[in-house]
Amino acid sequence: MEQRMLLVHAHPDDETINQGATMAKYVARGTQVTLVTCTLGEEGEVLVPELEHLAADRDDALGAHRITELAQAMKELGVTDHRFLGGAGKYRDSGMVWHEEGHAVAGDDVREGTFWRADLTEAAADLVEVIREVRPQVMVTYDEFGGYGHPDHIQAHRVATYAASLAAARSFRPDLGPAWDVAKIYWGAMSESRMRDGLRRLRESGDTTTFEGMDPEGPLPHFVTSDELLDAVVEGGEFVEAKMAAMRAHATQITVDGPFFALSNNVGNEVWGVEFFRLAKGVRGPVGPHGLETDLFAGLG
Ligand SMILES: [Zn+2]
């Protein structure tokens, strides 16, 4: 079977942070990997001092720059098919504010033309066209809360979910291609036990600030999933270097130094090379020793 995987993400860099090792691993084994990014990430903060002028509240030129960062990141991961939903710049980054409960939320002043304000059917149709062209057996996106509440992540979840359903209906927009039913849909996830373990190691190493000083034994944010709700794990340890290189490519967004990344040198592949998933559609295939699928195509023959 020719394997094809589609990932739907909100901003350039989300794909690398969440599934960089998975993407590199599947590319290496010959899977056709397609990335759809829904916005250019125009509202991102700029971490490179010389490029601060690109920010939305100054030159508002970050989007074009992040296209080049994403292209470089995809080169590092070996992904040759990456697209922007509806074409680059059609949907603008909606920005976000922090809610007092510690997750992201849409601001009061989300503008026209942003992804959050997009018409759901129109945005889904843009993705239906890709689904019907690529015909992926596996699709990866966010959970219904977009991991941590960012409106663009929530919208990416909604668009991906709706598009998968519409793509399978022969009578929906036949002009967008023949119907295609995505067999398995996954939501990216973080393992609670891994998170607690990582926090413990950070605290033991003397770092008390990363993740806002979160207590390894205390309550964890929404994006962490209890282990019994996980369905699949992709062990991509040998692709950690590629993932790190892709993270570095997103230079305006990610600083690959500091204690959090130093941690990765110590515990290496475990933290960055292992990516977890929840199965949202389809039938669970055979599982590995930890009770999780170890291949997103498991059971598809
Ligand atoms: Zn994002």
Image: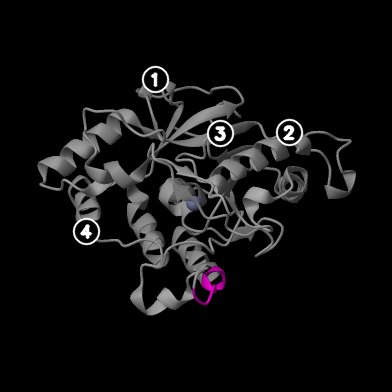
Q: Quadrant of the N terminus?
A: top right
Q: Amino acid at mark 1?
A: Glu
Q: Which residue is mark 1?
A: 228
Q: CA distance from mark 2 to mark 3?
A: 15 Å
Note whether 159 is above or below 285 in the view shown: below
Q: Which residues are magenta?
A: 58-64
Position of residue 172 relative to residue 290, above or below, is below
Confirm whether residue 1 shows in the render: no
Q: Residues within 10 Å of mark 3 (few under 14, many from 20)?
A: some
**Which is in the foreground here, disc 2 or disc 3?**
3
Whether residue 236 is in magenta: the answer is: no
Q: Left of 284 or right of it: where is 100?
A: left
Q: CA distance from mark 2 to mark 4?
A: 43 Å
Residue tagged 2 = 165
The residue singled out by tag 4 in the image is 258
Quote the CA–CA distance across marks 3 and 1.
Answer: 18 Å
Q: Is mark 3 within 8 Å of ligand 1?
A: no
Lower sequence index among marks 3 and 1: 3
Q: Amino acid at mark 2?
A: Ser
Amino acid type of the residue that numbered disc 4 sits on in the rendered structure:
Gly
The answer to which of 54 and 167 lies nearer the viewer is 54
Q: Which residue is mark 3?
A: 144
Res 234 seen here: yes
Marks 4 and 3, the one that precedes in the sequence = 3
Total numbered labels placed on residues in the image: 4
Q: Quadrant of residue 288?
A: top left
Q: Earlier in the sequence, mark 2 or mark 4?
A: 2
Q: Which residue is at a point 51% across and 70% down the rendered structure image?
A: 62
State the residue in front, 73 or 156. 156
In this picture, residue 77 sits left or right of residue 203: right
